[in-house]
Image (tube, helix red, strand yellow):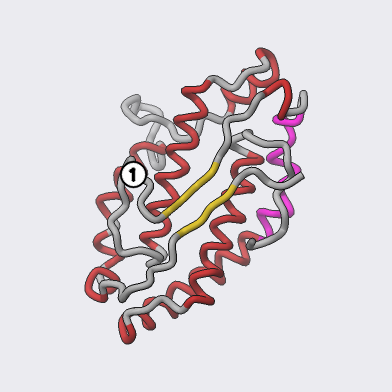
Amino acid sequence: MANPISLHIDYPDRELNRITSVFRPILIIPILAILALMSGSGAGKNWPIFAGGILFVPTVFMILFKWKYPRWWFDWNSNLTRFFLRVAAYLALLTDGYPSTDEEQVVHVEIPYPNVPKDLKTGLPLVKWFLAIPHYFVLFFLCIGVIGAVIIAWFAILFTGKYPRGLFDFVVGVMRWGLRVSAYAFLLVTDVYPPFSLE
C-alpha cells in the first residue's frame, strides 16, 4: 500500500534573498518563539497557558477505546505539523518567505484524516513509536547530513543567490521521511509503515 503522507516544497526558481539568508538565525527567533509556545517546548508544569503540542496520549486512548480520532484533535495535530514544517523550511533556507501561522505558502503537506475502524488496527497505536525505532537511528544521521547541506547551501546562496538543487532535494527528502515517521508513530493517522526513502 502506498504511503498516504506527502510533503512537497516548491523549488525557488528565482534568486533567494541574500540578506535574509545571512541573518536567518536572528530572523527566525520570533517565529521559533511562537512555535515553542504552541508546542509546549520548554514549558514548565506551572505554565498552563501553553497548548502542549501534539495530542498523542489522548489520541492513543481514543483510538483504542472509542475507535475514533476526534476531528478537531486531528486538525490541531496536522496544522501544528504543517506550521512546524514551514518554520523548518525557512530555517533550512528552502524559502525566504517568512513562515505563516496559517497559510500553506510553498510547503505542501498531505495528511489524510483516518477512518479509524477501516484504516487503523486495534492495539497498534501502543507500539508504533517502538516499531519506528530503526527510523530514528537513520534520521539522526540524516539530520547531521542536513546540517552540513544547509551550511553549504548558505554559502551558495550568499555567492550565487541559488540553492543547489541536489542539496534542496536532499533536505526536503529528509523532511519528508521525518514527516512520514511522525505521522505513523505520533500523529497516528496511518498504519502504513514509513519507507526508508527520501522520495
Outermost bottom residue: 159
Q: How many marks?
A: 1
Taking the spot 36% from the left edge, 37% from the top edge, the residue there is 38
Outermost left residue: 19
Q: Say whether residue 129 is magenta.
A: yes
Outermost top residue: 66
Q: Nearer the viewer, residue 10 or 93?
A: 10
Q: What percent of the width, then of the height, locates residue 87?
A: 38, 53
Q: Say whether residue 139 is magenta.
A: no
Q: Quadrant of residue 175?
A: bottom right
| 28 to the left or right of 197 | left
Q: What percent of the width, then of the height, locates residue 154?
A: 37, 77
The residue indicated by pointer 1 is 103
| 146 to the left or right of 139 | left
Q: Is residue 148 visible?
A: no
Q: Which residues are magenta?
A: 124-138
| 32 to the left or right of 149 | left
In the depicted structure, whether residue 182 falls above or below residue 10: above
| 82 to the left or right of 124 | left
Q: What percent of the width, then of the height, locates residue 138?
A: 68, 61
Q: What percent of the width, then of the height, locates residue 184?
A: 66, 41
Magenta region, main secondary structure:
helix
Mark 1 burial class by Cα count in 10 Å: few <14, some 14-19, many 20+? few
In the depicted structure, whether residue 197 falls above or below residue 156: above
Taking the spot 35% from the left edge, 31% from the top edge, the residue there is 50
Taking the spot 33% from the left edge, 85% from the top edge, the residue there is 160
